[in-house]
Image: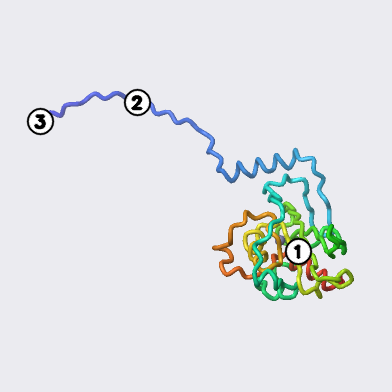
């Protein structure tokens, strides 16, 4: 039996050599390298490691919506002292306060109403992320006692505290206002039903660090 030969068209295969596509990680690294070379920010040389400053601030700061009070109640009349606020703060926040430092040494001053106050501009010095953008938070402690102009703030029976950080505003601003230890300034006035449903008073790590300075320096 004869086998029929089928004619087939010969196809020349061409192999074109292409460069492998760069991965996203490599492209990101190249972009970051280029940005660092173009950047005019002078690296600040500290004793141990290099800190690059001048990175734009990305997170928007909270708007000051004006001081508002919650309606007067048994709790707002009672108020909170600095020590009771520290005692109510979770251990984690107290532990995190170890890394918080003041921009300048806080000094004792007076509010418009003549109440003694301490203002601190606090930032977190994270040893594992030395190149991180510094976020400065305005932090206040005001003493409310009558005739307390000379008393150090930690001896006042009632204080007002305030910080501009997210932790404080989402967890403690409403709760402290409920306990007469804060005004509503940055929050929208809604109760923290998820973060702090029992309205436990307390402080963020910046306030803990500032109150530590107040206690140590008798401010
Ligand atoms: Zn804070």
Is 78 or 14 nearer to us in this picture?
78
Quick one: label 1, few (<14), some, or many (20+) residues within 10 Å?
some
First in sequence: mark 2 vs mark 3: 3
Rounded to the nearest angstrom, the CA distance separating label 1 from label 2 is 72 Å
Give SS at disc 1. Answer: strand
Q: Is residue 120 left or right of residue 69?
A: right
- What kind of element bears circle 2? loop
Nearest to viewer (mark 1 / mark 2) = 1
Q: Residue at x 73, y 67 (%)?
A: 97
Badge 2 local density, few (<14 within 10 Å), some, or many (20+)?
few
Colour mapping used in the image: rainbow
In the rendering, at what x and y percent does residue 208 appear?
74, 68
Between 118 and 53, which is closer to the camera in this rendering?
118
Ligand 1 within 8 Å of disc 2? The answer is: no
Q: Which residue is mark 2?
A: 11
The residues tagged by marks 2 and 3 sit, at their Cα atoms, a distance apart of 30 Å
Residue that extends furthest to the left in the rendered view of this protein: 1
Residue 148 x/y as whole percent = 85, 71
Q: Which residue is mark 1?
A: 100
- For residue 194, side relative to residue 56 (left or right): left
């Amino acid at each position: 039996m004869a086998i029929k030969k089928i004619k087939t068209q010969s196809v020349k295969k061409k192999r074109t050599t292409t460069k492998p596509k760069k991965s996203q990680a490599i492209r990101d690294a190249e972009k970051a390298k280029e940005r660092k070379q173009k950047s005019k920010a002078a690296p600040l040389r500290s004793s141990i490691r290099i800190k690059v400053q001048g990175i734009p601030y990305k997170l928007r700061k909270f708007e000051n919506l004006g001081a508002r009070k919650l309606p007067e109640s048994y709790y707002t009349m009672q108020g909170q002292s600095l020590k009771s606020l520290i005692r109510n703060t979770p251990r984690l926040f107290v532990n995190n306060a170890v890394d918080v430092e003041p921009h300048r040494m806080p000094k004792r001053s007076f509010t418009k109403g003549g109440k003694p106050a301490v203002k601190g501009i606090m930032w977190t010095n994270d040893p594992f992320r030395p190149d991180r953008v510094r976020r400065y938070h305005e932090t206040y402690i005001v003493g409310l006692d009558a005739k307390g102009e000379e008393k150090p703030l930690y001896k006042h029976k009632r204080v007002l505290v305030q910080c501009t950080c997210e932790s404080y505003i989402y967890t403690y601003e409403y709760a402290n206002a409920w306990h007469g230890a804060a005004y509503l300034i940055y929050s929208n006035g809604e109760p923290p039903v998820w973060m702090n449903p029992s309205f436990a008073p307390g402080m963020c790590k910046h306030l803990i660090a500032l109150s530590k300075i107040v206690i140590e320096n008798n401010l």
